[in-house]
Amino acid sequence: MKIILKEDIQNLGYKDDIVEVKDGYGRNYLIPQGKAIIANPSNIKQLEENQRQRAHKLAKIKADAEAVAASLADVSLTIGAKASATGTIFGSVNNIQISEALEKLGHNIDRKIIVLKESVKELGKYTAKINLHKEVSVEIPFEVVAE
């Protein structure tokens, strides 16, 4: 089933992308939740017209994302966590804590666009990927230290 996404969906696509999904996923989840519409010829024609009209806005959004990426390029974070003597963290470090650490530095980044490549359960150095735009992303190094 071909659908047009109405919003960004992790591991599927970005807003206004035409993607192929299984029938049940489209009919039972994406369409009822308002996250997608069926890609029939009239909806595709309407999408193309909307994209033509929004071209200027999309260029500005991409430029803003590139500016944020440039400001985050040289940022390095240190996150404190309670840890045992062997270096294992009690709990784990997640995207919420990274978002809060960035906010303390003056960068307001939504936690939903921060992706960790691996689970952080020990002290050490890691990287987090921030997807600012479908064509712009930046990797932030961070270090987890014992409190």
Image: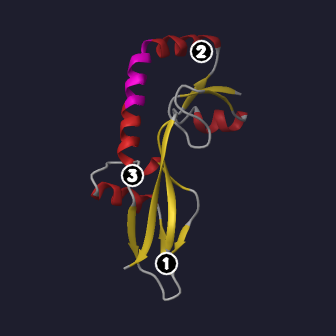
In the picture of the structure, the residue carrying the numbered disc 3 is 74
- Disc 3 is placed on an element classified as loop
Q: Residue at x 49, y 78 (%)?
A: 89
Q: Amino acid at mark 3?
A: Asp
Q: Residue at x 42, y 23 (%)?
A: 59
In the foreground, 97 or 123: 123
Q: Which residues are magenta?
A: 53-63
Q: Amino acid at mark 2?
A: Ile
Q: Alpha-carbon distance for marks 2 and 3?
A: 41 Å
- Disc 1 is placed on an element classified as strand
In the picture of the structure, the residue carrying the numbered disc 2 is 44
Residue 114, compared with residue 56, is above or below; it is: below
Q: Amino acid at mark 1?
A: Ile
In the picture of the structure, the residue carrying the numbered disc 1 is 89
Mark found first going from the N terminus, 3 or 1 = 3
Mark found first going from the N terminus, 2 or 3 = 2
Q: Residue at x 63, y 20 (%)?
A: 39
Estimate the x, y position of residue 62 in percent, counting from the top left.
Answer: 42, 30
Verify CB contact (< 8 Å) between mark 2 and mark 3. Answer: no
Foreground tag (3 vs 1): 3
Indicate the quadrant containing the C terminus: top left, top right, bottom left or bottom right. Answer: bottom left
Residue 118, compared with residue 60, is above or below; it is: below
Estimate the x, y position of residue 25 in percent, counting from the top left.
Answer: 67, 38
| Quarter of the image where one finds residue 142 | bottom left
Q: Is residue 76 left or right of residue 119?
A: left
